[in-house]
Image (cartoon, helix red, strand yellow):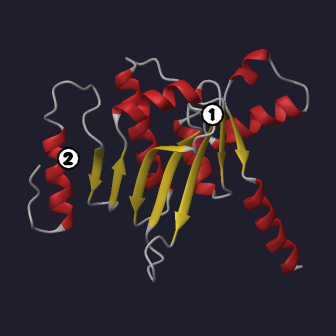
C-alpha cells in the first residue's frame, strides 16, 4: 500500500480510501475515521468487532481515556474500548481505539457511535449492547457511553438506577446495561475532595 508523502492527515485519508476498496468485508479495513474538524483518528476492524460482539453480551466492557499521550502536549487523548480476551490467561484486548485532540462529548460520541454503527452493519442491525461498562469518572465519557452504548440519556439512566435502588423497578429495567465506575478513579476523586476540605 503506497502512502503519499504530503501531510499526515492527507496520508491517513489516502490509507482509509485504499482500505475501503476491499470487496470481501462488510466493515472494510482498520482505519475508519480521519476527522479534520475534531482532529481524530479511529481504528478498529471486522475481526475486533466479532470479538466485541461475542464478549459484550456476557462480560464486562471497559472504555478508557488517557490524556497527555504525547510528551509535553496535554491536548492529545487516547480512548479505547477493551474486552477480556476470549482465551483465558491472555491480556485484555483493545477492540477499538481513538486518538484525538479534544476531550468532549461530540468527539467521544462520534468514536463510540462509529464503532456501534460498524457493529450494526456487520450484524445487520442485531447489535449486542454491553451488559456492564466500566469507565473512569469523566462526565463526558460517562455521557457518551450512556448515549451510544445504552441508548439512554444521563437523566433517564439515573432515574432507572434510582428506581432499581429503591425497589420500584420492573424486570425489564434490570435487563438494560449498567455503568460501573473504576474504583481507583473513584478513590482518587474522593481523596481530592477530602484534601480540599
Q: Residue at x 21, y 56 (%)?
A: 12
**In the figure, 69 relative to 40: above or below?**
below
Can residue 41 be seen?
yes
**In the figure, 146 relative to 181: above or below?**
above
* Image mark for residue 16: 2
Task: Classify mark 2: residues with Cα within 10 Å, few (<14), some (14-19) or many (20+).
Answer: some
Residue 125 x/y as whole percent: 41, 19
Q: Residue at x 35, y 31 (%)?
A: 46
Mark 1 sits on what residue?
A: 88
* Image mark for residue 144: none
Q: Residue at x 80, y 74 (%)?
A: 192
Residue 43 x/y as whole percent: 35, 47
Q: Residue at x 28, y 55 (%)?
A: 35
Regarding mark 2 in the picture, which secondary structure is present there?
A: helix
Q: Quadrant of residue 88?
A: top right
Front residue (pair 167, 73):
73
Front residue (pair 122, 51):
51
Counting the numbered discs, the total is 2
Quadrant where the C terminus sits is bottom right
Amino acid at each position: 500500500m503506497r502512502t503519499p508523502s504530503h501531510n499526515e492527515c492527507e496520508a491517513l485519508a489516502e490509507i482509509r480510501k485504499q482500505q475501503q476498496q476491499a470487496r470481501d468485508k462488510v466493515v472494510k479495513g482498520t482505519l475508519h475515521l480521519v476527522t479534520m474538524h475534531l482532529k481524530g483518528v479511529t481504528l478498529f476492524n471486522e475481526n475486533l468487532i466479532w470479538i466485541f460482539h461475542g464478549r459484550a453480551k456476557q462480560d464486562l466492557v471497559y472504555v478508557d481515556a488517557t490524556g497527555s499521550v504525547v510528551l509535553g502536549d496535554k491536548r492529545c487523548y487516547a480512548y479505547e474500548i477493551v474486552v477480556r480476551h476470549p482465551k483465558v490467561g491472555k491480556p485484555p484486548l483493545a477492540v477499538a481505539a481513538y486518538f484525538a485532540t479534544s476531550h468532549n462529548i461530540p468527539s467521544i460520541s462520534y468514536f463510540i457511535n462509529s464503532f456501534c454503527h460498524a457493529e450494526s452493519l456487520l450484524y445487520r442491525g442485531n447489535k449486542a449492547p454491553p451488559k456492564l461498562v466500566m469507565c473512569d469518572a469523566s462526565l463526558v465519557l460517562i455521557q457518551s457511553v450512556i448515549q451510544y452504548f445504552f441508548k439512554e440519556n444521563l437523566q433517564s439512566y439515573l432515574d432507572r438506577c434510582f428506581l432499581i435502588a429503591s425497589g420500584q423497578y420492573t424486570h425489564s429495567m434490570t435487563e438494560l446495561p449498567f455503568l460501573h465506575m473504576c474504583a481507583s478513579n473513584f478513590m482518587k476523586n474522593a481523596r481530592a475532595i477530602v484534601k480540599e476540605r
